[in-house]
Image: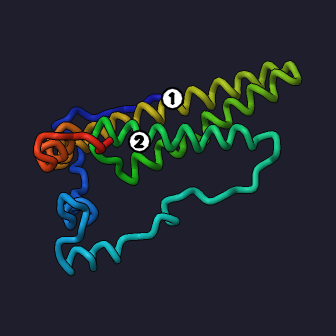
C-alpha cells in the first residue's frame, strides 16, 4: 500500500473546532466560570460514547484484542501529546491500524501453530498495512495541528505553567 500525500500548500483545509468548554469554561481552580459554560459542559457527549464497546471475540483472539485496545489508547495519547489534539479521522486511522496489528499477531500465531507459510504472508501484509495506517495518522495529525490555532502541545503546557504562577506541579 502506498500513501500519497499532497504538498502542504495543496492540502485541504482542516475543520476548525470551537474552544473546549472543559478547558475554556473553568477557572484555575477547576470551577465553572459561568452558566453558559455549565450548559456547554452538559451538552457534551458522555464518556461511554468514547469507550470501545466490549466485543465477543474468539477466545484465542482475546489476548490480542486486549493488546489492541491498550495499544490504541496509548497511541492516541501519544498523538495528542505530540500534536495537541486528535481528530475523528486520525482516531479512525489509529483504530484501523490497531485492528490490523492485532490481526497480524493473531495470524502469525495461527501460522506458527500449523507451519503455514501463506499464514505468515497474510500476517506480514496485515502488519505492513497497519504501519501505513499509523504513518498516515501521524502525518494527518501533524498537518491538522499546523492549521489549528493555538493548539500546540507547547502552547498548552505554557498556558498551564503560567496559569499556576510559574509552577507546573500536579499537571501531568
Give the image location of residue 77, x and y in percent.
41, 41
Residue 130 sits in quarter: top right
Mark 2 nearby-residue class (10 Å; few <14, some 14–19, many ≥20): some
The colour scheme used here is rainbow
Which residue does the image show at 25% across and 56% down from the upper left? 15
Number of the label disc, if any, that sits on residue 72:
none
Name the residue furthest right.
114
Q: Position of 156 compared to 137: left or right?
A: left
Quarter of the image that includes the C terminus: top left
Q: Position of 94 compared to 61: left or right?
A: left
In this rendering, the answer to whether 8 lies above or below 14 is above
Q: Nearer the viewer, mark 2 or mark 1?
A: 2
The number of callouts visible is: 2
Q: Position of 169 compared to 62: left or right?
A: left
Q: Nearer the viewer, residue 112 or 5?
A: 112
Which residue, given by chain and number where applicable, does mark 2 sit on? 77
In this rendering, the answer to whether 155 lies above or below 33 is above
Q: Nearer the viewer, residue 158 or 131?
A: 158
- Between the C-alphas of marks 2 and 1, the distance is 17 Å
Q: Nearer the viewer, residue 52 or 139?
A: 52
Which residue does the image show at 28% across and 63% down from the upper left? 22
Which residue, given by chain and number where applicable, does mark 1 sit on? 131
- Mark before the other along the chain sequence, 2 or 1: 2
Residue 40 sits in quarter: bottom left
In this rendering, the answer to whether 104 lies above or below 43 is above
Q: Position of 102 compared to 49: left or right?
A: right
Amino acid at each position: 500500500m502506498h500513501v500519497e500525500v499532497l504538498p502542504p500548500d495543496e492540502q485541504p483545509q482542516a475543520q476548525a473546532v470551537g474552544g473546549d468548554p472543559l478547558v475554556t469554561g473553568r477557572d484555575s481552580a477547576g470551577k465553572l466560570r459561568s452558566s453558559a459554560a455549565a450548559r456547554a459542559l452538559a451538552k457534551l457527549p458522555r464518556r461511554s460514547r468514547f469507550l470501545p464497546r466490549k466485543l465477543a471475540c474468539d477466545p484465542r483472539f482475546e489476548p490480542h484484542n486486549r493488546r489492541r485496545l491498550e495499544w490504541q489508547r496509548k497511541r492516541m495519547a501519544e498523538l495528542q501529546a505530540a500534536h495537541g489534539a486528535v481528530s475523528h479521522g486520525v482516531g479512525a486511522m489509529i483504530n484501523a491500524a490497531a485492528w490490523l496489528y492485532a490481526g497480524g499477531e493473531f495470524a502469525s500465531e495461527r501460522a506458527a501453530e500449523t507451519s503455514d507459510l501463506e499464514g505468515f504472508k497474510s500476517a506480514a501484509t496485515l502488519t505492513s498495512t497497519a504501519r501505513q495506517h499509523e504513518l498516515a495518522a501521524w502525518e494527518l495529525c501533524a498537518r491538522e495541528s499546523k492549521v489549528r490555532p493555538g493548539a500546540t502541545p507547547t502552547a498548552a503546557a505554557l498556558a498551564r505553567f503560567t496559569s499556576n504562577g510559574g509552577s507546573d506541579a500536579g499537571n501531568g
